[in-house]
Amino acid sequence: MADLSPPEHEHSAIVDQAIEFYVANYGNVERPIVPALQRRFGLTAHQAVTVIRETTLRRARAA
């Protein structure tokens, strides 16, 4: 099994903040979403996709 560095298996505080923002503002976030999250939170493309993925999972669990 590959040894994963923290960015590959943990969320940073800014990613967690972006997830909370996106969950709370799901229908109102400007499109396209990845660049909007990058601008608002200074995320990398990978981090923005992580935010989208986690938000999707949370919304699915809540449904």
Image (cartoon, rainbow, N blue to C red):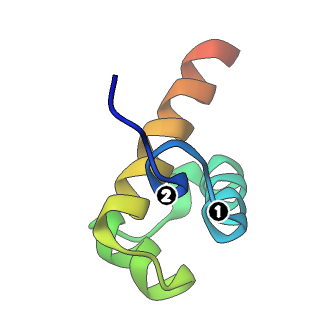
Find residue 13 and report its horizontal and vertical position in percent. 72, 66
Q: Quadrant of residue 16?
A: bottom right
Question: In screen coordinates, is 43 left or right of 26?
Answer: left
Find residue 21 and report its horizontal and vertical position in percent. 68, 61
- Type of amino acid under label 2: Pro
- Type of amino acid under label 1: Ser
Q: Quadrant of the C terminus?
A: top right
- For mark 1, what is the residue? 12
SS of the residue under disc 2? helix
- For mark 2, what is the residue? 7
Question: In screen coordinates, is 52 left or right of 11?
Answer: left
Of 62 and 4, nearer the camera is: 4
Q: Report, in whole angstroms, how far the alpha carbon at label 2 lies from the one at label 1.
A: 7 Å
Up the image or down, 40 lies above or below 54; here it is: below
- The residue at 53%/25% (across/down) is 57
Q: Quadrant of residue 44?
A: bottom left
Q: Quadrant of residue 34?
A: bottom left
Question: In screen coordinates, is 14 left or right of 34?
Answer: right
- Asked if the residues shown at circle 2 and circle 1 are in contact, with their CB atoms under 8 angstroms apart, the answer is yes
Is residue 29 at least partly visible in the picture? yes
SS of the residue under disc 1? loop
- The residue at 55%/17% (across/down) is 60
- The residue at 62%/64% (across/down) is 18
* Tag in front: 2 or 1: 2
Up the image or down, 15 lies above or below 19; here it is: below
Find residue 52 and report its horizontal and vertical position in percent. 43, 47
Question: In screen coordinates, is 6 left or right of 4?
Answer: right
Of 48 and 23, nearer the camera is: 48
Of 48 and 29, nearer the camera is: 48
